[in-house]
Image (spheres, helix red, strand yellow):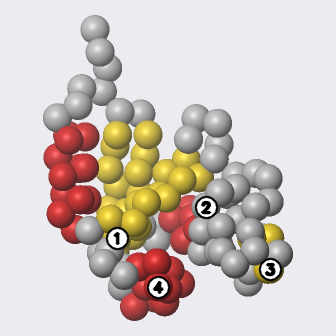
Amino acid sequence: MSETTNSYQTWPGTNIIRDPGKFEGEPSYVPDLWEKVLDGGNDETIMDSDTVVSVLWLDDEVRTRVGEDAEGSDAICLWETELGFVMSRLMTKADVNRFAAECADTPMYED
């Protein structure tokens, strides 16, 4: 078991957090990026029904935190589930644009 810079335990040979809780199953860089989002550091916000999805474009700072996982990606999207777990997904610019367009076409409330 290895220890990350934010003191979460990861599965051996991976950067996936094994500690139970909010970030379990996510890469070890997600807690730091989530903190950045909570401090207002996200670049864009996409509303997916009632879920707030925060987009961080992979500038040099974010790309350095994400490391080799960032290869082929332009952004990382972060959101909190109804149960309080934080989830993430690396995406290309086209994927972010497609996701945002799909969310814009989705009614907030269904009759």
Question: Which residue lies at the image location 43% right of the left edge and 46% below the top edge?
Answer: 52
Badge 3: residue crowd in 10 Å (few <14, some 14–19, many ≥20): some
CA gap between label 2 and label 3 equals 14 Å
Q: Decide which of 68, 111 is in the foreground and name it.
A: 68
> Which image quadrant: the C terminus?
top left
Residue 77, quarter of picture: bottom left
CA gap between label 3 and label 1 equals 25 Å
Q: Amino acid at mark 1?
A: Ala
Element marked by disc 1: strand
Q: Nearer the viewer, mark 3 or mark 1?
A: 3
CA gap between label 1 and label 4 equals 13 Å
Element marked by disc 2: loop
Tell me: 75 left or right of 36: left
Which tag, 2 or 3, sits closer to the chain's start? 3
What residue is shown with label 2? 26
Q: CB atoms at circles 1 and 4 under 8 Å apart?
A: no
Element marked by disc 3: strand
What residue is shown with label 3? 3
